[in-house]
Amino acid sequence: MVSTGRRGLTPVSFTRVEVDDPFWATRIETNRVVTIPIAYQHSEETGRIDAWKLDWREGREPVPHPYWDSDVAKWIEAAAYSLAAHPEPELERRVDSVVDMIAAAQQPDGYLNTYFTVVAPERRWANLGMWHELYCAGHLIEAALAYHEATGKRKLLDVVCRYADHIDSVFGPGKRDGCPGHQEIELALVKLYRATGEQRYRELAGFFLDQRGSRPSFFQREMETLDPEASRLNRHFFGEGEGFHTEYCQDHVPVREQSDVVGHAVRAMYMYCAMADLAAETDDAALLRACKRLWKSVCEKRMYVTGGIGPSSHNEGFTDDYDLPNASAYAETCAAIGLVFWNHRLLQLERDGRYADAMERALYNGAVSGVSLDGERFFYVNPLESRGDAHRQPWFACSCCPPNIARLVASFGQYVYSESRSEAWVHLYVQGRGELDLDGRKVVIEQKTGYPWKEKVAIAVRPQRAAEFTLALRIPGWCSGATAKLDGRSLRLAPISRKGYARIRRRWNPGDTVELTLPMPVERVEANPAVAADAGRVALQRGPLVYCLEEVDNGRNLNDLILPRNAKLGAKFERNLLGGVTVISGRGRRADRSAWKGALYRFAGSRTKPVTVKAVPYCVWENRRPGEMLVWIREA
Amino acid sequence: MVSTGRRGLTPVSFTRVEVDDPFWATRIETNRVVTIPIAYQHSEETGRIDAWKLDWREGREPVPHPYWDSDVAKWIEAAAYSLAAHPEPELERRVDSVVDMIAAAQQPDGYLNTYFTVVAPERRWANLGMWHELYCAGHLIEAALAYHEATGKRKLLDVVCRYADHIDSVFGPGKRDGCPGHQEIELALVKLYRATGEQRYRELAGFFLDQRGSRPSFFQREMETLDPEASRLNRHFFGEGEGFHTEYCQDHVPVREQSDVVGHAVRAMYMYCAMADLAAETDDAALLRACKRLWKSVCEKRMYVTGGIGPSSHNEGFTDDYDLPNASAYAETCAAIGLVFWNHRLLQLERDGRYADAMERALYNGAVSGVSLDGERFFYVNPLESRGDAHRQPWFACSCCPPNIARLVASFGQYVYSESRSEAWVHLYVQGRGELDLDGRKVVIEQKTGYPWKEKVAIAVRPQRAAEFTLALRIPGWCSGATAKLDGRSLRLAPISRKGYARIRRRWNPGDTVELTLPMPVERVEANPAVAADAGRVALQRGPLVYCLEEVDNGRNLNDLILPRNAKLGAKFERNLLGGVTVISGRGRRADRSAWKGALYRFAGSRTKPVTVKAVPYCVWENRRPGEMLVWIREA
């Protein structure tokens, strides 16, 4: 079980949260019946499952790939979350059989990696910068913890503990130097420490983190030990000379000194998660300060309005402040998921709604956009504008995103509530229930709501017996004019609200109910003037959802559409559209191309004609006829 | 002397045109006293002059470069034009001494190239795709023709004729296959044919042109003969596999079948010049049709409003229709110059003002922007938006642009007039005079005008004796409401105007005067809606000049400025600014950044404050304090 850090709130485990809302419940069900099975199927078809048999021989196809183990691990993790909410003996048997294969693949010394056992055994731990050996280990640990928490079964947990012990016997002070090119094991080791109480795991996580930014860099020293072929490959990925090993994998300065988010976006997010985790466990104020500086860099200067991050395909990551091109946005699904993980951690530590706002922004927009409504196709890249050539794919050669979105959706429940000794926190409004434990006192919280489509949320509080504690209800950053009633009587929110949460401290009786109204007018979002790509444009948002235009609703050439500043915009729920969504529509204008007759330039006098503009939530785009898409709409 | 082709008009030679206007005369003088001397100085300091001594030996620095000969040739050409307008014994002696060196460097068989004589003699004609051997030959021919025309001196002309004879002995039907990777010799050989009457030169130009697009491609066949090192280099520049040798150097289909402008922009323009030249000489209708298709591709789909062409630095050239990014615009100075050359040729052939419009657009904007007002610094790349990091440079390692702009400015006079047996054509309005020859009848045309700043042009026609002929006066495409008076009496233009020219056929007496008024209101230019980069933006234009905003006049963050649709814009001549320019100003609005307090997004309600917006001609930007620049201004 994931226990709390020494500081902060504890997220209420997915095992104690039920989700039954109009937005997530269907996705979770589709994830269970479609995505998780096809993730297994693709893993099997591509050889990722059989690789665990360790019977690959030179010359055979396919050759196992150094990243494969992580895909299977994430599938196990997703399956675990799903099993907790919805037991399925057949799925559990399938996981058990994969666990058996993994356990059988573990080497006598505890080592556990398919590629470096059968394909390149002589390279074990030889190229941490390039290959994802420690990254795969991290995902195996996360899988084991989730499966143990969901089912109580220890087999995989025991396996990964032995593996972690082996890694700990190789790396650390007085042992080998080193850290992973792609962060992940750090956060996994803190999780493992929390579940087992074994301090060595936490210390090893700290060791890996603290290797970064040392000079001469570990990665540079490592590269000098490589043969020319491997060295060439490393240079290709990390860049030559000065650029090598630095910003791409956040090795440019020691972690406590980092301020600007740089490099590969997923690596950055996973690392910041571990930094927040260790800050929570060790009261390391410098780590927390670094997280807060980095958060401002990400969320106030380098984040898309969808919660997507990392604009550039070049490094799958970050560039400059306010550089947020829309059509070429990379915004990898895994990066938005990483942003959720990190903000979730900072929220527990800081009890500050801005982290919940960022988490919700990514969850409801740029992360969940990564999977189609039918659960069968995936975006690796999530642009904010498309000329019609962006389509979700069934799988990828480097297929990190599909199982990542599967584990996110399956574990969604864990983002809804937190608990502490005397506080019950509601971060997200999601119909369903959570069973909280306030220092031994059970408190059930039941939400009835049509969120994110509807403004009203009824929150019933059911302590086992009457008790005094604080119920902290998030007032989302996007919402102004929230109102509440407590047991039918109006409750003034302003005096009890701080940092984005209304904190109601009182003696709660079973069945006490708070009715929250979160007004959801259609809002026009504008970007900071420093974001050149969005100048003269607005995005539409309603509640937590960012909207977009699609060609199927608005015709081709979406950049010909202009939204007059005074155009009235209305919202309407359409039951039969895209599984049931609220659409936004209003009167806009469209440039009249027919008047151009082939000219490239002309003196102004542009004719426009009135049109109806219709927007749908960004997260459900590209689920109908393929075509153009646009988030930032021209305004005039 | 450049004579006419068999079809079309004949440009009036630079030797017979005087320019004395407020825009060009100063530039021509600065070109003479600053640019031409420093082009020589840089050529000398970098070893380009001494290379002709052929005394380079292995191990010495600098190593002559395969492109160097062309830089010196373009310098001679520029000097020649300048000498015709402004004799300078010292400059002429300097050219003569370089000519002596060049003549002495000619090999017994006529061959003439420094690099392939001293550095890589074994590679002569071995790698036409990559090295610029034939390109350099073409520039030497152009230099020789200009110097002969300016001074009557034949020495260099004789040298290049021997060289052309040598090239003709190597290449052609029944001899070697081949054509240059970088076109240039084709147009030079047609010029040489026109000056000498030697048909072989024209035929060789046609041979080189017709090699392109053959399959298997000449370049591919050539590459197979190269050693691995040279082959690798070729692949690096031309791209691997399918892409190799095709679009980059316009070798994708035979020239008569080409329709879309592709690849390296300068190569394309120089090739199209030769196609137009041969179409004129041989009545090759298919070549002319191809030129007209390509013209539509360039000028109606792929040209910046400045006349800059070739948006991408990747191939120094073209991409897709309407792909005209502003900040990353490559728009090489040489490419805009090439656009002038080509449109000038099509104008003679077609007598159609749209070619004059394109020629004028490039001449007054995106070509002349290539040189600073003080004549000392040069743009290779001409973006339409700058964050403040674009600055003209004194010289370049690959320094094609500086001598190219020098020869363009020095030869400007040749673009003003054309003559035919019974027609006198005025393409550009430029104070000064031209001496035309209409089938033996001398006609002097004198212009008095403050163009491009002022609307009025007085054109005095002075035939030697009264004679009937047509005076064709261009009514620029940017101008509506042009009016004219003939000898003081109003002249209705509509009935006599066709394809952008008012054609006044009458008996002209010496001193007859046409007074033309070309209204120059400030115009807002909009781009075709298909140009995504310009959506919601306008450029400002007055007369032929496109304007831009500079930071020095408008402060930082030019994309924060908004020009309301109804903002009145005024024009005013400022004598002491940038050598005397008309500036445009009006009331705009500026986004109020101070209200943002670090937020990245917010719901609309953007505050703006009124500001004065001031624009200067694009061609003179980056001549004051360095900073941001913007052509396409947000409109609201």
Image (cartoon, coloured by chain):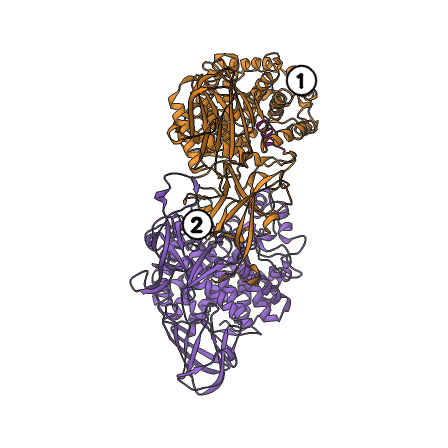
Chain colours: A orange, B purple
Dot 2 amino acid type: Ala
Q: Which residue is mark 1?
A: A96
Magenta region, residue range? A397-408
Query: Is residue A490 magenta-colored?
Result: no
Is the residue at mark 1 from the same chain as the one at mark 2?
no
Q: In the rendering, at what x and y percent does residue B163 appear? A: 53, 62
Query: In whole angstroms, how far apart are the C-alphas of marks 1 and 2?
Result: 66 Å
Viewer-closest of B393 and A67? A67
Query: Quarter holding the C terminus of chain B?
Result: bottom left
* Most common SS among magenta residues: helix
Q: Quadrant of residue A84?
A: top right
Of the two numbered discs 1 and 2 in the rendering, the one whose residue sits closer to the viewer:
1
**What's the chain of the residue with tag 1?**
A
Viewer-closest of B606 and A337? B606
Helix, strand or loop at label 1? It is helix
Dot 1 amino acid type: Asp
**What's the chain of the residue with tag 2?**
B
Residue B237 seen: yes
Q: Residues within 10 Å of mark 2 (few under 14, many from 20)?
A: few
Residue B186 seen: no
**Rendered residue at 59%/33% (across/down):** A22
Viewer-closest of B389 and A580? A580
Q: In the rendering, at what x and y percent does residue A515 appear? A: 49, 30
Q: Which mark is residue B397?
A: 2
